[in-house]
Amino acid sequence: MLPLAATMALGVMVAAQAHQVNLSTARVTLGSDRSVSVEVGLKGSDADRFAGTTIFDAQRDQVDPALFTASAASIIAYVTAHIAVTGADGRACVPGTAALVPDGDGVIFRNRFSCRDVGGDIVYRSTVLTDTDP
């Protein structure tokens, strides 16, 4: 559980086997209107393993743009299921519409949450890449 201050940048790396990266980054920003912007970066190979997609071209060490479009919804669903923005009491902030963009060898997930009706501290939780390891 992380109380949200102004801006946080988080990096998570867990034990990896050969050709498994298990690296994600999160940038969480609190707006003056109690909105929370969340940006999660994933390596393409990790997105493939955890979301069941095939967007990563290992020979080029890049996300394949042609495969990305068909797989974006699955990756968005995976990240959405593994992050939460809530009040300290567990009351959920209202998510906006999530978006995903390719970023060289990975992808970036973005969403904005409205916490204007949630009192007290705001908490960001993530189990991206840590909930299960296929």
Image (cartoon, rainbow, N blue to C red):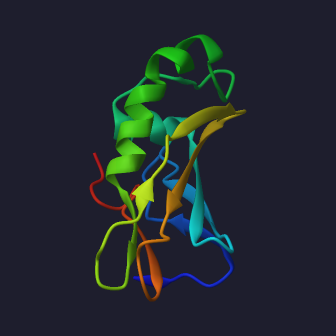
Closest to the observer: 36 or 106?
36
Q: Which quadrant holds residue 51?
A: top left
As drawn, the residue found furthest toward the right would be: 104
In the image, residue 84 sits, relative to residue 69, either above or below, namely below
Closest to the observer: 86 or 133?
86
Closest to the observer: 73 or 92?
92
Counting from the top left corner in percent of width and height, residue 128 is at 41, 56
Q: Which quadrant holds residue 75?
A: top left
Q: Residue at x 62, y 85 (%)?
A: 5
What is the number of callouts on the image?
0
Q: Residue at x 58, y 72 (%)?
A: 34
Quarter that holds the C terminus: top left
Counting from the top left corner in percent of width and height, residue 113 is at 50, 59
In the image, residue 109 sits, relative to residue 92, either above or below, namely above
In the displayed structure image, the side of residue 45 where residue 77 appears, left or right: left
In the displayed structure image, the side of residue 59 where residue 124 appears, left or right: left
Q: Residue at x 29, y 84 (%)?
A: 89
Q: Which quadrant holds residue 1?
A: bottom left
Q: Residue at x 54, y 17 (%)?
A: 69
As drawn, the residue found furthest toward the front would be: 117
Counting from the top left corner in percent of width and height, residue 104 is at 72, 33
Counting from the top left corner in percent of width and height, residue 114 is at 50, 62
